[in-house]
Amino acid sequence: MHTSTVGIIGGGTMGAGIAQVAAMNGWMVELREVDEPTARRAIDGIVQRLDRLLEKDRISAENHDDAVSRLCVATCSDCLSECELVIEAIVERLDVKAAAFREVLPSLRPDAILATNTSSLSVTQLGEAVGQPQRLAGMHFFNPAPLMKLVEVIAGEQTDPLVVDRVAQIAHQWGKEVARASDSPGFIVNHVARPYYLEAFRLLEAGLAGVDEIDAAMREVGGFRMGPLELADLIGMDINTAAARSVWEQLGRPALLEPSALQERIVAQGHLGRKSGRGCYDYSAEPPSPAIEVQRRPLALSDSQRDLVARFARRGGERVGSELQNYIFARILVCIFAQATQALRRGVAQRQDIDTAMRFGVNYPRGPFEWMRAIGPDLCDEVLVMLAESSESDRYRAQPLAEVAT
């Protein structure tokens, strides 16, 4: 039986993770790094992770040994000559990625597929810079690649549809859920997820809730594994802020995605989340405690508004919470819905792909469109109208969700 080979350029956290996924799913792996010792260290790290999986009985001895035997160091560009697929997973700079592809291109099979793991760069522009736009697609894994189920498959403007189909097929063979996207800023996940964080910071800025209250509402009422502020701390406040500003700028500065001044201030102070010991939370002791002081003001809802957010929570939540919890949940979730419908209107992806991406890329309990249908698009629109009427900003004046929800 013929064994396929994948070349992976870059042996950092993401490249090594992708290499592990490929090796565990029957592919030979040629790992290329700046030099041979660096590549060998990367493979040693993968072997250590496979050893731990064996110790914990997560894989059999046979599967362990087979995967280890498939990991090879690409000591020169010619080592990639038998690769069906070459994936780059290096620094997020278009010139560096393009140079890496151009260096190996002469030794590749003419039908070898080029894939970029970029999360923020244009697949179209990278394909043009490489000089082979028809052969290059996005294959965006999520960190850690061996655990996260999603791969976003992105078609550049000139990517051959057969290339996109094959990349999607390979991702499925490697046990991943695939969401197809067009070459748009943030693709699906980084495009649609922005309001999850931004609305949480707006609630803090308005003094309506504290850090722990916001996170608790989204976990307890919404069923999210992590609240938005603890998740931003885990991702890295600098990374999360940069993604927010990048998507906002590239989409023409829509009001719904305007970056949070509070979040940018936290980053400017060097509070980057867990990795720096402080972000929205202070991690100097266990359990972490809120690190942002809020000038509290009461939430003033009318009886009809109180009833509206309670109905929203009843239909869409794990349970109905307090008045404040229901409001937090309804406000953040309906803004995600608004952004998802904007992504659909912009042609970023189809409904099913958006739902798949959000469920498996950021572990949402349900995809936005599935969730919207369960709650009722008209009720979601009522919440948006309520937010628009009570805000001086026009960020909530979205096009009706009911038009595209189903």
Image (cartoon, rainbow, N blue to C red):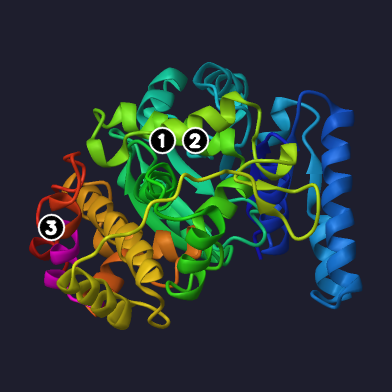
Residue 310 within the magenta-colored segment of the rendering: no
Would you name the residue on which mark 3 appears?
Answer: 385
Query: What is the x, y in percent for residue 253?
Result: 26, 29
Q: Residue at x 45, y 41 (%)?
A: 138
Q: Secondary structure at mark 3?
A: helix
Image quadrant occupied by the N terminus:
bottom right
Which kind of residue does numbered mark 2 sit on? Gln
Image quadrant occupied by the C terminus:
bottom left
Q: Secondary structure at mark 1?
A: loop
Query: What is the x, y in percent for residue 395?
Result: 21, 42
Q: Which residues are magenta?
A: 375-384
The answer to whether 244 appears left or right of 216 in the picture is left
Residue 239, which numbered label? none
Which kind of residue does numbered mark 3 sit on? Val
Would you name the residue on which mark 2 appears?
Answer: 263
Number of numbered discs overlaid on the protein picture? 3
Q: Residues within 10 Å of mark 1 (few under 14, many from 20)?
A: some
- Tell me which secondary structure the magenta stretch mostly adopts: helix
Would you name the residue on which mark 1 appears?
Answer: 260
The answer to whether 9 appears left or right of 85 in the picture is right
Image vertical order of residue 175 relative to residue 19, above or below:
below
Report whether residue 163 is seen: no
Q: Spatial distance from mark 3 to mark 1, Cα to Cα?
A: 22 Å
Q: CB of mark 1 within 8 Å of CB of mark 2? A: yes
Q: CB of mark 3 within 8 Å of CB of mark 1? A: no
Q: Residues within 10 Å of mark 3 (few under 14, many from 20)?
A: some
Query: What is the x, y in percent for residue 268?
Result: 58, 24
